Image (cartoon, rainbow, N blue to C red):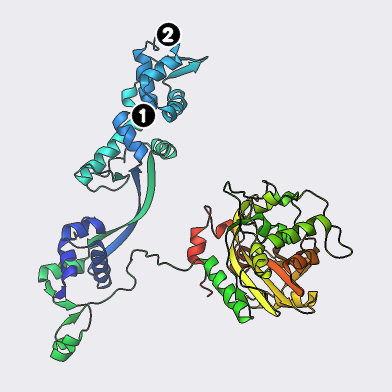
């Protein structure tokens, strides 16, 4: 019988009486594990091998566990120091014993917590008494750590830190933990001295047909794994044996890179808005409070401008503000705009206006563009947007983060109405399959009328706030020199992503608590 060379090596290595794990079989046959695995399943399909599966539990020493193998468990060092200090005869001051045990700060708490648990003695009123009958040399946890370290060193042959042992397998001495009580192993895992790993072990035995094939003789056939131009032109393809591929064989999981779901959503938003005739704005993340809030007719004593909501930066104030614009904005705050304007009659400081903070919204970009500072004076109609990060000192929950992405947008034109504003949102959100958009009247210092937007979550059915909008007030537009209507909005990118992906918690999307499995499995929508 002629077989591919890897199959011949596997057959000659496998046993008819003893189950051989594939990883050991690969080592003995001098094959790569994935090559041996493929050969095993090919031989199984030909009826020459049997493959059985079992679950194995492995334990691996952590760095802390390795340290205690060498230095000893803290509670054992505490007990031995206590005995040396005479605490097995009468109580000794605890501080004296701790000092003699040479325990660092974290180890002191560990030692005290486990000293009594293991029956090494008692601690009362600042004094420590050691049990003279305790035997620290027979500590089961220390013995398990030492056994595991010794087995791992023997397996590695060089004492490498890759310390692992199997609690059930019987190969290479890794059955060293088979007699260790499970409760001891559980305790070591809870103490973060061991890590527990579960894996599937596949073992191989020869079938009767496999034994017969070996007795009759098995030869290695020359095989090729691909058809090349050389084989075609020479005609050799007719004489060679092509490797068979087992598409059911196990293969290592390979996680390829993919665009983050938020980046997908952001790019989609940009394309949709560009398709609706908008141009993109850009600007600084850290900006003068003048652009962030003062131009928006936000009073300087507004709660949102305190340290509770604002991230102020300890840097020199900005110097290059348009002086005439600063004067007009200050006048709007103090005196109002127009015959009926009244202003706030509240404190206004130019020093505060020039102070630097992280922007709490990207409307600071809108102020820069509408004022003509960025691209010169604009004539209607104009449409601008941005999709950039903002920063707020919010309480973290399922719909709030300290930093998130805002979809900023505004339209300047003549005779704009609320119907134009609402119609823009309907058209925008329809591009994402969201047709149930609801509006609720709201108050903003910078828009009148103002509306909050809500969208219905596809999984929970809950209405989620997805943005804020309105028509800019005269107190905002007149100081900027804008003589036309401007409708504007700030929408939450993350909440749009929640509606399109079905995520129920904004923290699943990004941040330190991001759900990696959710992100890996999220449908590529763009």
Q: Residues within 10 Å of mark 1 (few under 14, many from 20)?
A: many
Residue 150 at x, y percent in the picture: 25, 38
Dividing the picture into quadrants, the one containing residue 188 is top left
Dividing the picture into quadrants, the one containing residue 275 is bottom right
Q: How far apart are marks 2 and 1 (CA)?
A: 24 Å
Residue identifier under label 2: 90
Residue 518 at x, y percent in the picture: 52, 62
Res 73 label = 1
Q: How many labels does the image show?
A: 2
Q: Is residue 127 left or right of residue 137?
A: right
Say if mark 2 contacts mark 1, CB within 8 Å. no
Of the pair 244 and 50, the residue shown nearer to us: 244
N-term-proximal mark, 2 vs 1:
1
Question: Which residue is painted at 80% across and 67% down in the image?
Answer: 474
Dividing the picture into quadrants, the one containing residue 74 is top left
Q: Can residue 133 be seen in this view?
A: no
Q: Residues within 10 Å of mark 2 (few under 14, many from 20)?
A: few
Q: Is residue 505 left or right of residue 423?
A: left
Height in image: 150 above or below 520? above
Residue 458 at x, y percent in the picture: 65, 68
Q: Is mark 2 on a helix, strand or loop?
A: loop
Height in image: 464 above or below 397? below
Res 217 label = none
The residue most toward the top is 90
Q: Is residue 382 visible?
A: yes
Of the pair 370 and 510, the residue shown nearer to us: 370
Of the pair 86 and 408, the residue shown nearer to us: 408
The residue most toward the right is 340
């Amino acid at each position: 019988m002629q077989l591919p060379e890897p199959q011949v090596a596997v057959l000659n290595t496998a046993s008819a009486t003893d189950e051989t794990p594939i990883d050991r079989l690969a080592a003995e046959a001098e094959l790569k594990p994935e090559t041996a695995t493929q050969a095993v399943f090919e031989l199984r399909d030909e009826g020459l091998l049997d493959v059985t599966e079992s679950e194995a539990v492995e334990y691996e020493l952590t760095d802390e566990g390795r340290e205690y193998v060498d230095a000893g468990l803290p509670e054992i060092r505490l007990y031995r120091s206590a005995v040396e200090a005479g605490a097995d005869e009468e109580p000794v001051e605890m501080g004296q014993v701790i000092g003699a045990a040479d325990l660092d700060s974290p180890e002191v708490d560990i030692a005290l917590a486990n000293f009594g648990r293991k029956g090494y003695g008692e601690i009362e009123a600042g004094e420590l008494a050691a049990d003279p009958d305790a035997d620290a040399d027979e500590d089961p946890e220390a013995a398990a750590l030492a056994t595991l370290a010794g087995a791992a060193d023997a397996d590695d042959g060089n004492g490498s830190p890759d310390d692992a042992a199997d609690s059930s397998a019987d190969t290479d001495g890794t059955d060293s933990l088979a007699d260790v009580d499970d409760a001891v192993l559980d305790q070591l895992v809870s103490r973060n001295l061991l890590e527990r790993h579960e894996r599937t072990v596949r073992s191989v035995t020869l079938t009767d047909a496999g034994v017969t094939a070996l007795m009759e003789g098995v030869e290695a056939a020359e095989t090729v794994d691909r058809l090349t131009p050389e084989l075609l032109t020479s005609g050799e393809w007719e004489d060679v044996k092509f490797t068979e591929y087992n598409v059911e064989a196990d293969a290592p999981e390979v996680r390829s890179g993919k665009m983050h779901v938020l980046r997908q959503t952001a790019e989609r938003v940009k394309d949709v808005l560009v398709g609706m005739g908008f141009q993109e704005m850009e600007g600084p993340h850290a900006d003068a409070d003048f652009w962030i809030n003062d131009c928006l007719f936000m009073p300087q004593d507004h709660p949102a401008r305190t340290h509770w909501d604002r991230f102020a930066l300890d840097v020199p104030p900005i110097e290059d503000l348009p002086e005439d614009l600063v004067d007009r904005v200050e006048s709007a705050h103090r005196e109002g705009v127009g015959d009926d304007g009244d202003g706030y009659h509240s404190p206004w400081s130019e020093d505060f206006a020039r102070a630097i903070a992280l922007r709490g919204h990207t409307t600071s970009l809108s102020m820069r563009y509408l004022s003509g500072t960025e691209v010169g004076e604009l004539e209607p109609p104009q449409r601008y947007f941005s999709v950039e990060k903002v920063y707020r000192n919010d309480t973290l929950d399922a719909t709030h983060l300290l930093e998130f992405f805002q979809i900023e947008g505004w339209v300047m034109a003549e005779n704009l109405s609320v119907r134009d504003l609402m119609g823009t949102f309907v058209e925008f959100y329809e591009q994402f399959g969201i047709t149930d958009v609801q509006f609720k009247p709201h108050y903003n210092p910078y828009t009148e009328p103002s509306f909050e937007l809500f969208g219905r979550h596809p999984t929970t059915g809950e209405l989620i706030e997805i943005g804020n909008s309105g028509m800019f007030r005269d107190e905002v537009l007149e100081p900027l020199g804008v003589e036309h209507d401007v409708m504007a909005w700030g929408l939450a990118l993350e909440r749009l992503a929640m509606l399109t992906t079905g995520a129920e918690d904004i923290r699943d999307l990004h941040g330190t608590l991001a759900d990696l499995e959710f992100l890996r499995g999220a449908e590529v929508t763009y």
